[in-house]
Every structure is written in structure tokens, then in C-alpha cells.
Image (cartoon, rainbow, N blue to C red):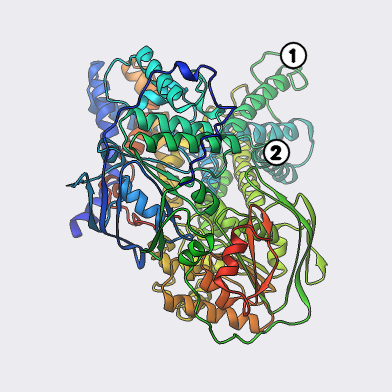
């Protein structure tokens, strides 16, 4: 057990910590998940997961993106309903139909973006979730809130507006709210993303206090050092299944191996890399509120497939969007086939042969309300003024056949299934492309469709098209790329040859090794 | 299934009937038999050729503005500034009518062209405020409406005031060759009527089968995706605004060059706002537009007769149209009401 009592935060502490009312009282709750299944279409998000959680302990839930962690926790917190399986709280079957149900049963979840109401004041937000009484007693509630905050070592300003608080403060507030509503089990989904170091310490010490009081804490995280620091025990999920558990401390390598299964060696894909550069990045800098990429260099050659690993939000998407011309550069230059396109708009780069395949489908990429045929017409170069319906209906039918889309030219895209929407995005790509930028090329596709999509992509690669793609699937990265680099906190690691790397090495790169 | 189709077919009529009932009750409450009341309105709108022509003369500019608004609506824009665009069109046409001495065959095309350009520029201003300044088109449009009216008042009372002195009511009447040729003694210009018909059909065809129409559709339904598919959102939004402004400006020209014979204080008479209501009713069904504008025009003309006959104020016509719009918006789409929206599929959680 690694519980650093010394590392109590200075900033967030109230001066009168000793004057706090004493003792948290709470029942202890045994949580048991039995054979939980949850499918989203063909995707098995949770495929028969069973685990038991004892009170007074801090658990880590590990797994790569898409392993099913969030789904499992959303089921436990009543946000999703499991397709099958059983949840027992203290040996009694619990029917958690909604987050409110779950909270009434003692299970509370703090989401990555806390579910508070930005324009409201702290106290009002605290009152909001409380038992419906017509008259709200603000003074009683204020006292309750301050007492709780004091016990946890948080500093709370009752009259502050939520929107002026930092993410960390909102998290603390949410924690207090759940605590005051009688939560016994606390689920935190990636709680340390976007909060300061002091707030992290403050959060961890409060979580330790909770566990000492007999509460159960579940930490969903990719960050192994934090898990090592805080947790007593970890569960590892992979592709919807529980694949391992370990007591902490446990060697990090072992955890990584459990998270990313050993990749079977495959026959090497024939390299189609050509000598000439397709994409050249010099000192690239991109800056958003959450993340920055600084001074980055990269060269992708014609016919090369370059894979980007990394946890979601580490910078891969920024890079792809910057290359597509969707994000302004804060510095540096982008060369496309020997031409400086740094200041070119998205549409100009598109005409020059750059394609961007986003990960959202109906959010960005497809237009709900338009038919497939209309999409094809919209994405094709304009010919004359009048849209030639007959021509595009034939053209669309050809692409539907080619990409194996279950649909008709006149089908509206929102009526297609997720996998068919994904295939439609590829069907909209133009013929001659120099560079394809893809986010999660096959997310949500079954194995056979994924194979087919890559086959079609590789045909383009044979023509000299370069592909730069981000994926959360290490198999896909290793199998499809020529080279791979990982992003961590906006910094790109060294690039490794896909044929020589291993899941272990990628795991370390994802974890921040340069 | 068949019953459902029947229901869907008659659905648009339901709010119309309901609005008539509400207005009928209102009439009854004031002691007027609803049948007499509606009869008076009908009489007032179509009782004799002069009245019918007057209804049509009012119909022309409203139809022009409404056709323009369908374009902006398709692009997902609420061009409330249409009122100001009508006014600016009227101002531009009046300027030429007052100042340019040219034969009719030259002057009238110039007037119409100037009105379209002025309306388009005025709409473009709201469009630029929207795309570049991030000012929502509703607020930008409202502000520009105010400015347009102030500009008219300034011109009437200042530079363009009649020689006998400023009255704040209007400019001096235009010379005959500046006016659109009118049908008999009426205020209807057959030319403008033809133009309006051509515009409706043109807008229908453009939105239905051309690239600009398709781009606007994409833009209106999902700007982000449309952008990624290659639609230049900023340019298309601006063009949609300007197209609408041009048609509204044309409507303004028709107002000053046929309905009136000079630039007046309230030159539009709220036609832009009426056109907005028309478009709310018609949605994207362009071919319904002329019918709805005809209905509005008839009701508003008819209510004047209603006032003369029953001493009820003519604003009752406004109430009828207003109630109608409210009811249509309330009843909405049948499919939405019955909640049989497709696409309610569960998506995988983002992990």
C-alpha cells in the first residue's frame, strides 16, 4: 500500500482543519458485478465481466481506449442498462435504472466533465440534487456543505459561480455532493485529466480518507503512475473482458502487458514506401486551450502508412487536423509534396489531394438529412450548375457496391448503421489523393469490414498515397503501419518501425517515453 | 398504414381550420356572426376585380421576400433583416426614380437592378457580421432594420424632401416613366407579378437540383460536416443572405414603383415579417409559398372590409394570421408529434 500521508496539499487546505466536526459515519458496502454484458451493435463493449469490490478499498480499472471501462462504470452508476448480468449491492440484487436510482442505492459517479450546471452558484448546485422539498433551506445546506468540505480538506466558496471554478474545484464539489447524498461507492472517470498537481494531491488525499471511512473508490484511468500511487488493487479490461487483476504495488511492465495483449508476430507487409516526401512538418506548433503541440518535425513519404498511437486527447487529433488545415498553426511549416501549404485553407489542401476522415460520423463527416447520392455529389468536384441525378445515382451505386455499404443511393445517411456510415465516409474520398488523414480508421467496424477498408486503403497506398492515421488499437497500428509514433501530452515520441516494435514498447511510448 | 398516410395528407389543413375556429370564436365574442365576419373578409379580398387586383399587388412583394427567405432558411439562417433589405431596395429604386432622367425602358431595369444590389449589400452586411463578427444574423438583422428605417426617414425629411417642404411623410411622386406599368386603375404591375412567379419557380429549381442548392442544404443541416465535404460555409452563407437580400430588395422596388408612387416612411408595411411567417408555415416547400402568401394577402386586405362592415378593428386579420402561425408551429410535424422519429439508435460510448 502506497499511501503518502505527508503529501497533503497546501493550497486547497483550510487553515482551521483541526476545528472540523469529527468523524464520517457510513455503512460499508459490498459490490458485486456478475457476468455483465453490454453490446452496442456489433461492438461488445462489455462481454461477461464479473468482479467483486470490497468496502474500504481503492480500485483501479485499467484498459486501453475502448476496452469497456467507461461502459462498465456507466452501467454500475445507472447511466447505461446492461443487456444482461446482475449487480448486487450488499448481496441484494440492485436494479439501477438511472443515475438517480444508483445514487439512492449508494453508487455515485464523477464524470470526466462534471455534470453540474455552469451558470449556477456553488450552493444552488449542491441543493439541486437533494431531496425534493419545496422550500430549500439554504443555511442548513450551506452548513452541511462546509462541514463536508472541511472534513475533506477542500476550500469551497459558496457564492462562487460554477463557471468560474476550475475543473478540479468542480470535481471536489461533485464529490461533496455525492458524499452528502449518501454515496458509498465513488466512481471517478479519468479524474486527473485537466486538473492541477495540487488539486490532484488534494483529490487523492480525500479519496484515501473516503476509503479509510469504509467507502469504496473506483478509479478509471490510463495513467499507470497514478494507479500505482493511489490504488490497492487493479482490474484490467481488454475488449470487453476482464483479463487480469493485481494487487498494487505491481511492476508497471506487468500491467502494460495485461492492458495490451501480446501481439502475435505477423508476416511483414510489403513496404510500398517511395523515396519522395508526401508530408513534411517543420517545427510545427499547434495550440488549443487544453493541449499544445510544440516544435514538432515529421516526414511521411509517399506510399507510407504512418500510425499515431496514444491515449485519446494526447495530440494525435490536433496533428491530423493541423495537417488537414482545420486548425491554425501557432508556428512552423507544413509542406505537401514539396509545396508549402502552411497557410492554405482546408478546402485548398483538399483540392491539392489531402483528405481527412474524422472519427465522428453524423457529427462531422456526414450530413443527416441528405441522401448518400447527395453526399457523393457534394463531395465530388462540381460539374456544371445542375446536379446530374442520373449520373450520381449510378456513381453512388458503384461506390455502395465497392465499399459494401448496406443502403441505396437515395437512403438518408442517418438511416444507415454506424458501420455503414463509417464505410460511407471512405466512399466519399476522391480518387487521386496524396495524403489521407484518418482518425480511428476502423473503430466500430467488425473484423471483416475493417480488413476490407484497409485493403481498399492499401490499394491507394500502392498508387503512392500516404496515410497518417491515429488509432487506439495497437494491433491495427502494428499490423497496418510502416512506422509508428506515440503521442503523450502533446509530445510525439520517436518513430519506431512497425515490423520491429512490440506492444510493450508501444505501451511505454504511450506512457510518455520519448 | 393507409390511415397514417391519409392523416399525414390532411395534416397541414388542421391548423388552418383550428385558426379559423379560434378567430371565429373571437368574432362571436364581439357579437359578430363568424360566418358574416369571414364573408366580409372574403368579400373584401375578392368581392370585385379591383379588390382582387389589390390583393395580388400586395402578394407580389411578399412572395418575393418569402422566396428569398426560403433560400436563407435552407442554409440554416434566420434572416430577420429581410425587412430592412426591402426598405433598402425601395430606397435604391427611389433614388434612381427621383434623380435619373431616362426613358422608361432604361430606367425601370436600372431601378430594379439597383434595388436588388442594395438589398443584397444590406443582407451581405448582416452576413459579414455573422461570418466574420460572430453576430447572430437575428440580432444583426434587427439592428440593420432599424438603421434602414432611420435612413429612409432621413432621406424623406432631408435630401429627398419634396420641393414644397419636408413633411416627414414621403418624397415627391415619381415621374410617370419611373413607375412600373400598372394594370388599369389598379396598383398591380403585371410585370412584377410575372417576375414573382419566375422567382418562385427559379428558387424551387435551384434548391431542388443545382449545386448551390445542394450546398445550402448541406450547410443548413450540418455546417461542420458540409465544410468537411467541401462546402465553403462562409461564402455560401454570405451568398444565401445576398440572394435573399436581392429578392427582398426587388420586393421593395415593387412597393415604391407600383403600390406607392414615392418613398414613404413605412415603405415595407411589415411585409418582411409577414414573409417570415409565411416561410415558417411553408418550411422548405417552395411551391406552397405563393398559396400561403395569397392567403395572407387576402386575409389582410379582407380585414379592412371587415372593419367597415362590423366596426371591428382590421387588426383582426393580423390576429388570424398570427394564430395560424402559432398553431402550425404548435402542431408541427406529424411525425414529430407521434414520436416515430427514426435514428434513435444507441451509439457506443466514447471511451
Whether residue A427 appears in this view of the structure is no
Residue that mark 1 sits on: B164
In what element is the residue under mark 2?
A: helix
Residue A293 appears left or right of A410? right
Residue A457: image quadrant is bottom right
In what element is the residue under mark 1?
A: loop
Question: Residue A463: x percent and y percent?
Answer: 67, 83
Residue A108: image quadrant is top left
Q: Determine the residue positioned at 45% across, 59% down.
A: A63
Q: Determine the residue positioned at 51% across, 47% down.
A: A229
In primary-sequence order, the first of circles 1 and 2 is: 2
Residue that mark 2 sits on: B118
Q: Which chain is home to disc 2? A: B
Q: In the depicted view, which residue is nearer to us: A30 or B271?
A: A30
Question: Residue A193: x percent and y percent?
Answer: 55, 45
**How many numbered marks have been drawn onto this rendered protein structure?**
2
Question: Residue B57: x percent and y percent?
Answer: 51, 37
Amino acid at each position: 500500500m502506497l499511501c503518502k500521508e505527508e503529501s497533503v496539499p497546501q493550497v486547497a487546505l483550510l487553515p482551521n482543519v483541526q476545528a472540523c466536526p469529527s468523524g464520517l459515519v457510513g455503512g460499508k458496502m459490498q459490490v458485486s458485478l456478475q457476468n455483465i454484458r453490454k453490446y452496442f451493435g456489433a461492438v461488445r463493449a462489455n462481454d461477461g465481466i464479473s468482479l467483486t469490490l470490497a468496502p474500504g478499498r481503492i480500485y483501479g480499472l485499467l484498459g486501453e481506449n475502448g476496452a469497456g471501462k467507461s461502459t462498465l462504470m456507466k452501467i454500475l452508476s445507472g447511466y447505461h442498462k446492461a443487456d444482461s448480468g446482475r449487480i448486487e449491492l450488499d448481496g441484494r440484487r440492485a436494479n439501477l435504472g438511472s443515475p438517480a436510482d444508483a445514487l439512492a442505492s449508494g453508487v455515485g459517479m464523477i464524470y470526466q466533465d462534471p455534470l453540474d450546471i455552469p451558470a449556477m452558484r456553488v450552493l444552488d448546485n449542491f441543493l439541486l440534487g437533494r431531496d425534493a422539498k419545496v422550500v430549500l433551506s439554504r443555511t442548513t445546506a450551506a452548513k452541511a456543505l462546509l462541514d463536508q468540505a472541511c472534513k475533506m480538506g477542500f476550500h469551497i466558496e459558496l457564492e462562487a459561480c460554477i463557471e468560474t471554478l476550475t475543473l478540479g474545484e468542480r470535481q471536489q464539489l461533485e464529490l461533496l455532493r455525492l458524499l452528502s447524498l449518501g454515496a458509498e461507492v465513488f466512481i471517478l472517470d479519468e479524474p486527473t485529466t485537466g486538473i492541477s498537481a495540487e488539486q490532484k494531491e488534494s483529490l487523492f488525499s480525500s479519496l484515501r480518507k473516503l476509503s479509510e471511512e469504509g467507502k469504496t473508490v473506483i478509479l478509471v484511468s490510463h495513467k499507470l503512475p497514478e494507479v500505482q500511487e493511489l490504488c490497492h488493487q487493479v482490474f484490467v479490461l481488454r475488449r470487453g473482458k476482464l483479463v487480469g487483476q493485481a494487487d498494487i504495488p505491481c511492476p508497471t511492465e506487468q500491467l502494460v502487458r495485461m492492458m495490451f495483449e501480446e501481439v502475435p508476430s505477423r508476416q511483414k507487409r510489403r513496404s510500398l514506401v517511395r523515396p519522395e516526401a508526401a508530408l513534411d512538418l517543420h517545427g510545427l506548433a499547434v495550440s488549443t486551450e487544453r493541449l499544445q503541440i510544440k516544435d514538432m518535425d515529421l516526414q511521411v513519404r509517399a506510399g507510407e502508412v504512418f500510425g499515431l498511437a496514444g491515449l485519446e486527447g494526447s495530440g494525435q487529433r490536433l496533428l491530423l487536423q493541423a495537417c488537414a488545415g482545420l486548425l491554425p498553426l501557432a508556428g512552423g511549416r507544413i509542406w505537401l509534396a514539396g509545396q508549402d501549404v502552411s497557410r492554405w485553407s482546408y478546402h485548398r489542401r483538399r483540392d491539392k489531394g489531402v483528405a481527412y476522415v474524422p472519427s465522428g460520423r453524423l457529427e462531422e463527416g456526414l450530413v443527416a438529412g441528405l441522401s448518400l447520392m447527395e453526399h457523393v455529389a457534394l463531395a465530388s468536384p462540381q460539374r456544371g450548375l445542375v446536379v446530374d441525378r442520373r449520373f450520381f445515382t449510378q456513381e453512388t451505386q458503384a461506390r455502395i457496391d465497392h465499399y459494401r455499404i448496406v443502403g441505396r443511393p437515395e437512403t438518408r445517411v442517418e438511416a444507415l448503421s454506424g458501420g455503414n456510415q463509417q464505410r460511407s465516409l471512405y466512399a466519399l474520398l476522391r480518387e487521386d489523393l496524396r495524403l489521407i488523414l484518418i482518425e480511428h480508421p476502423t473503430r466500430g467496424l467488425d473484423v471483416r469490414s475493417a480488413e476490407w477498408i484497409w485493403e481498399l486503403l492499401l490499394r491507394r497506398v500502392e498508387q503512392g498515397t500516404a496515410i497518417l492515421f491515429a488509432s487506439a488499437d495497437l494491433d491495427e497500428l502494428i499490423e497496418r503501419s510502416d512506422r509508428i509514433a506515440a503521442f503523450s501530452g502533446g509530445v510525439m515520441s520517436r518513430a519506431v518501425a512497425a515490423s520491429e516494435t512490440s506492444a510493450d514498447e508501444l505501451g511505454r511510448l504511450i506512457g510518455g517515453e520519448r | 398504414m393507409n390511415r397514417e398516410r391519409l392523416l399525414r395528407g390532411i395534416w397541414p389543413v388542421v391548423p388552418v381550420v383550428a385558426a379559423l375556429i379560434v378567430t371565429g370564436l373571437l368574432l362571436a365574442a364581439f357579437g359578430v356572426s363568424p360566418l358574416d365576419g369571414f364573408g366580409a373578409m372574403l368579400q373584401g379580398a375578392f368581392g370585385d376585380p379591383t379588390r382582387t387586383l389589390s390583393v395580388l399587388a400586395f402578394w407580389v412583394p411578399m412572395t418575393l421576400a418569402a422566396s428569398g427567405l426560403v433560400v436563407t432558411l435552407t442554409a440554416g439562417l434566420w434572416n430577420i433583416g429581410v425587412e430592412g433589405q426591402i426598405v433598402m431596395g425601395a430606397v435604391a429604386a427611389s433614388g434612381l426614380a427621383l434623380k435619373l432622367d431616362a426613358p422608361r425602358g432604361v430606367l425601370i431595369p436600372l431601378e430594379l437592378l439597383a434595388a436588388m444590389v442594395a438589398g443584397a449589400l444590406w443582407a451581405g452586411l448582416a452576413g459579414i457580421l455573422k461570418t466574420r463578427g460572430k453576430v447572430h444574423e437575428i440580432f444583426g438583422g434587427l439592428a440593420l432594420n432599424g438603421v434602414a428605417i432611420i435612413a429612409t426617414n432621413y432621406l424623406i425629411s432631408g435630401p429627398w424632401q419634396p420641393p414644397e417642404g419636408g413633411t416627414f411623410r414621403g418624397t415627391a411622386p415619381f415621374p410617370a416613366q419611373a413607375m412600373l406599368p400598372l394594370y388599369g386603375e389598379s396598383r398591380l404591375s403585371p410585370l412584377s407579378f410575372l417576375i414573382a412567379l419566375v422567382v418562385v419557380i427559379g428558387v424551387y429549381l435551384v434548391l431542388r437540383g443545382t449545386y448551390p442548392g445542394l450546398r445550402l442544404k448541406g450547410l443548413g443541416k450540418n455546417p461542420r460536416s458540409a465544410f468537411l465535404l467541401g462546402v465553403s460555409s462562409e461564402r455560401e452563407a454570405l451568398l444565401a443572405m445576398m440572394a435573399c437580400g436581392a429578392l427582398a430588395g426587388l420586393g421593395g422596388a415593387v412597393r415604391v414603383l407600383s403600390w406607392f408612387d414615392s418613398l414613404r416612411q413605412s415603405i415595407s408595411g411589415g411585409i418582411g415579417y409577414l414573409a417570415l411567417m409565411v416561410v415558417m408555415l411553408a418550411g422548405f416547400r417552395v411551391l406552397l409559398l405563393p398559396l400561403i402568401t395569397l392567403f395572407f394577402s387576402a386575409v389582410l386586405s379582407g380585414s379592412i372590409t371587415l372593419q367597415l362592415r362590423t366596426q371591428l378593428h382590421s387588426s383582426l386579420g393580423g390576429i388570424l394570421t398570427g394564430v395560424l402561425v402559432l398553431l402550425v408551429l404548435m402542431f408541427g410535424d406529424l411525425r414529430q408529434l407521434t414520436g416515430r422519429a427514426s435514428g434513435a439508435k444507441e451509439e457506443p460510448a466514447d471511451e
